[in-house]
Image (spheres, coloured by chain):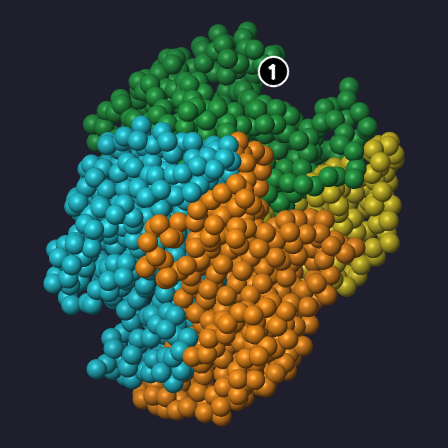
Chain colours: A yellow, B green, C cyan, D orange
Amino acid sequence: MSGNTFGKLFAVTSFGESHGPAIGCVIDGCPPGMTLTEADIQIELDRRRPGTSRHVTQRREPDTVEILSGVFEGKTTGTPIALLIRNEDQRSKDYQNIAQSFRPGHADYVYLQKYGLRDHRGGGRSSARETAVRVAAGAVAKKWLAERHGVRVRGYMSQLGPKEIPFVDWDAVGTNPFFAPNADMVPELEAFMDALRKSGDSVGAKIIVIAEGVPVGWGQPVYDRLDAQIAYAMMGINAVKGVEIGSGFGAITEPGSIHGDEMTPQGFLSNHAGGVLGGISTGQDIIVNLAVKPTSSIRLPRRSIDVHGQPTIVETHGRHDPCVAIRATPIAEAMLALVLIDAALLHRAQCGDVVSPAPRIPGRVVD
Amino acid sequence: MSGNTFGKLFAVTSFGESHGPAIGCVIDGCPPGMTLTEADIQIELDRRRPGTSRHVTQRREPDTVEILSGVFEGKTTGTPIALLIRNEDQRSKDYQNIAQSFRPGHADYVYLQKYGLRDHRGGGRSSARETAVRVAAGAVAKKWLAERHGVRVRGYMSQLGPKEIPFVDWDAVGTNPFFAPNADMVPELEAFMDALRKSGDSVGAKIIVIAEGVPVGWGQPVYDRLDAQIAYAMMGINAVKGVEIGSGFGAITEPGSIHGDEMTPQGFLSNHAGGVLGGISTGQDIIVNLAVKPTSSIRLPRRSIDVHGQPTIVETHGRHDPCVAIRATPIAEAMLALVLIDAALLHRAQCGDVVSPAPRIPGRVVD
Amino acid sequence: MSGNTFGKLFAVTSFGESHGPAIGCVIDGCPPGMTLTEADIQIELDRRRPGTSRHVTQRREPDTVEILSGVFEGKTTGTPIALLIRNEDQRSKDYQNIAQSFRPGHADYVYLQKYGLRDHRGGGRSSARETAVRVAAGAVAKKWLAERHGVRVRGYMSQLGPKEIPFVDWDAVGTNPFFAPNADMVPELEAFMDALRKSGDSVGAKIIVIAEGVPVGWGQPVYDRLDAQIAYAMMGINAVKGVEIGSGFGAITEPGSIHGDEMTPQGFLSNHAGGVLGGISTGQDIIVNLAVKPTSSIRLPRRSIDVHGQPTIVETHGRHDPCVAIRATPIAEAMLALVLIDAALLHRAQCGDVVSPAPRIPGRVVD
Amino acid sequence: MSGNTFGKLFAVTSFGESHGPAIGCVIDGCPPGMTLTEADIQIELDRRRPGTSRHVTQRREPDTVEILSGVFEGKTTGTPIALLIRNEDQRSKDYQNIAQSFRPGHADYVYLQKYGLRDHRGGGRSSARETAVRVAAGAVAKKWLAERHGVRVRGYMSQLGPKEIPFVDWDAVGTNPFFAPNADMVPELEAFMDALRKSGDSVGAKIIVIAEGVPVGWGQPVYDRLDAQIAYAMMGINAVKGVEIGSGFGAITEPGSIHGDEMTPQGFLSNHAGGVLGGISTGQDIIVNLAVKPTSSIRLPRRSIDVHGQPTIVETHGRHDPCVAIRATPIAEAMLALVLIDAALLHRAQCGDVVSPAPRIPGRVVD
């Protein structure tokens, strides 16, 4: 109920502040019998880790994960899996100024108003640091989805501020700090970020996440539709301001005769739906777009107020990502994986022995 | 868990199919002592009702609501409020053809694959008819929000297919079938819809919903952020494919020095955040945009398959909205109200006696 | 969250007051494809129905159930099943005196203190009338458990006030108004009740409920143990004050060398555990005992206070069961069935494809 | 959903195995602004700690708790509070024999059947070691209940095997290893336990827990009644087989004219209800009795089967409590506190601004 648990059957309960002793989570409901080691999780954490390039925060966090429970002799036991990540490189004194004033666009003000007090160090609970927990839990979900259902979840950055990044190939994504699917554009993106960093400003970006191999039938209409859960998961990522499934806002100007994906025995003729109809997966790729806002902690001076309600000017120094979206791709993948595993388990619970009288068509788009 | 309950503390459990005996819901958790009559709900249902203009389905449904429980001598008692709406104007035979094939872009195929059988009459559970229940429950939420917190939730259509509808004034919204905030454009919109209807095609639209007067502090980070719950609620509405909060996708190209809303003792200098920061309400207007896809049931012939997996051509006759979004405004308002009342109750549960040490600033934008 | 939904995956949301227009529920999460008619439910409702003998309330309620949704062409569709039971024989005026004072041992006082107002007619929401809803929902659960897993849930009265009722045979249970498993004792029980009724007093009873055929493995430790859920379900029945699993309070004086049920390849040598170990079903019969308190609405004068806090004397006339436990057996059966179906679905969700490396032993007790 | 989270608004998610690296929990939903230190929790953990007398397991566990999050500058922040307790004194090799066979009365067999594998070391997740987590979380709940509402939760052992322990005074409870409220009986209990230990057998006990100062109005009927939640919490404690509220099973033979607690402006004339009517607290003491079964791990030889389904004899050595109930009192207190804080927050959410038109009477029993 209280907001820090994600999922119903594969339930991830997150804890931890940016500058507290540790962050972590408890995963309750993971199916038993899956091989799982810390290395399976670490590989995903390393993709999100800070300090990996000059374009992200220079905070040095190894983000080493420890499995505290739920795994015995290398296999999940069906009991809660607790994951612990100790915080190591805190410079809390950097944040003393923030303690007395509120950063425009940041959660500082609302946390204090809601709770009556706040851990101002590095944003405390509102820090993007918490997203490491999502990536760790998502790694477990990804592994189960891949092994049990052959589902693959991956994403990339499709736009950095004003710069659209045309998709070239998936192989490029892992070879640059931006998760850009286009090696040729990387120098241009680096130059853009270098200039941005010097300017003291920040920028947003667009991320796309795709799940391949999802079988038809996942999702719990009418309220817990698969796309509704995806929207909840994505909008719940720090700094995300918009979510689209399939055509998204483009559907406004698509006539029904174009938008509705025609079907043939060999597969679909298009995928404007983005893999979800009526809140249930169609068997096609699930396609999700995210809009990520620019970092609110910037060096440029902004007008704000202090804790006494008096006018002040805020300039945020300390170590921040000039574009939080640069590290958002693995986070978005993790959240999509968490939605999918929960949908898979809920579907199995209610419809575990359903046999459809109608044949399934391939999820692919027929050329 | 099973997908048909919306909300945690103000929990709405929905039931009913398009052509079954009735639709309705149970609202569990409504605070006691609020005056409530069927008229309070009927007024909202009438805004969404079919058959009110030539631009929507001609199905004639009075959508008369009956309160079955939870209200005694005109006041809510704190016990479950059951709302019942009998279906009256069904023409199930219109749907015999649909029973044997799948409409492109519709839930027909996925429902059969998921459950192994389906009520094909008018789309059964996947029909937009279920949204009447949301409007009914939302009416109760709206009343409590208005009386207890002075919150006002309202919306309008900002784009119909290719036609953008510039906002002129709120008064216009209630005077035309489109919920358009611009009386001068109504003839143009009517002509557009008349041509569309003749063509046998359908179109999408963009809806904006705004909540005014929401106090600072509502929302349960990190997963149940207010904006995450809004995204879940909106993407859970039939045919919605995209959701934005505040700047939404526009935030991608806004530098941090523009996007971050500066604060003064007199209020904020802008509202790019759309009234939510860190998943918590700021006290500013909450601004939400929705993309609604075109109706999937159209007269134009489409390629599809039948229940035996064989190729077929589908032409959908019967009574359908050529633009489902025309009736979406009251639905979106209802869903936003349901998110807000739940957030209000959750906030009261955990932070009911919090007194912030910092003064609150006005939620308005300072000119 | 709000207290009127029972179960997580097979979720029953109940509504209705004793003297309102109707009572009923929505069952969300019922597996699709099961044949279900109103007759399947009516047969259980008729077992609990008032007015069936002189030993229970003379209120004449046919308790006719209507299925409003979730069933198509005689089969469950996987969508919410709404059940409606109209109230017919209300004599609200009988309760005018209760409106101004509080019955000792009744919920009158606490409802008014909690909610600030109450529907005093027949106890409103706190009336045992609501239990008809549980029986209706339980009938659906019982049918699925029997057809899918061969589980049988049944119970009987083992003690009426001071009179212990030795078990003779199951066949007797359906042949008398007390659900007594002992036909020879019925005259004695009837004489006892006749005298009690004349005296204007009331009495409690002990009920035993047994589930046969439950496979090993159901239950979600550590908090949602099967026995914990059973205790929750049973103590949640009006007037229940005690719950035992297996030996129950007898386990206090049983040494471990007696209480621990020994195992052989042919089965268990005893069943002190009552079919649950570590919160998980063992495959043995699940055995539950309930203590039901005497009816609080009695004719004898009792000291109490009125709504102004002044001393008063309360004598309750109107139509009441002198022993609410007489109709408790079908209710307890229903609640046990609701716990079991939820446990079955939760188990399938998490462990749906588990194959145990160890053989299962028969659940029966070896003689 | 998945069984390891207790509570809805004050939600405790537990993790950890007896012989894994650590046990602990995440508390989500704790109200902000309460002073909290590790010492506040440690004092309760020390009451339950093993190795404190010769009558309990000799495992040496300091059970030192570390607060990982949710507390800043000595105050709760409203964000999740993670508690970590490292396991220190494991002798896993003691359990090698258990790996191949099943202890009668223990969860060994059902865990393997349910999950397909198990952590056999010390019972893994089914070990009573997990109850340390409940005591830790309960300490936080107790503190809030005491500071915010003046509620006091305490308990004692009222019977050890065949030996009833008449209540003398609360002061005695903390002065002996049995939590016996009767100093004179301690030598007799010690002699009994010494003989039992030598015999290699085990014994059960009865525990009573009482909450004083609970205001009228807590509890969420009809399913989440306060007494139903208490029964769920208590039956969910390892080895508990029976739960009573107030008169419990005694209510069977109490006529209504005795059982129903009469009311006067000065208070109640009795408390047979045990502080709960209609599932809502009355303002009187909440009185709960538990039956705890004898330890299943005993030295005496028992018939059982091995993992291959073959007959075997099990004699359990290693370090076990001959009476698990000896350490059950602080656990039962913790669970009652967890139920009460959740009920308090749920009540505040729905009825936070209710003012009853009727005066409240004192909760005490009038002499």
| Left or right: D139 as drawn, with respect to B269 | left
Picture quadrant of residue C155? bottom left
Q: Residue at x 53, y 88 (%)?
A: D191
Q: Nearer the viewer, residue A180 or C2?
A: C2
Q: Residues within 10 Å of mark 1 (few under 14, many from 20)?
A: some
Q: Residue at x 61, y 83 (%)?
A: D53
A180 lies above or below A293: below
Q: Nearer the viewer, residue C10 or D301?
A: D301
Q: Residue at x 74, y 33 (%)?
A: B259
Q: Position of residue D255 (x, y in %)?
A: 33, 54
Q: Position of residue B354 (x, y in %)?
A: 70, 41
Q: Nearer the viewer, residue A21 or B32?
A: B32
| Left or right: A179 as drawn, with respect to C9 | right
C251 lies above or below C241: below
Host chain of mark 1: B
Kindly state the secondary structure of the residue where label 1 is placed: loop
Quadrant containing the C terminus of chain A is top left
Q: Position of residue A159 (x, y in %)?
A: 65, 41
| Left or right: A194 as drawn, with respect to B335 | right
| Left or right: B288 as drawn, with respect to C31 | right
C229 lies above or below C112: below
Decide if residue A335 is in sight here.
Answer: no
Decide if residue B271 is in sight here.
Answer: yes
Amino acid carrying label 1: it is: Phe
Q: Residue at x 67, y 64 (%)?
A: D41
Picture quadrant of residue A61? bottom right
**Farthest front residue in view:** D367
C194 lies above or below A106: below
Q: Nearer the viewer, residue D240 or D365?
A: D365
Q: Position of residue A262 (x, y in %)?
A: 36, 36
Q: What is the number of callouts on the image?
A: 1
Residue at label 1?
Answer: B167
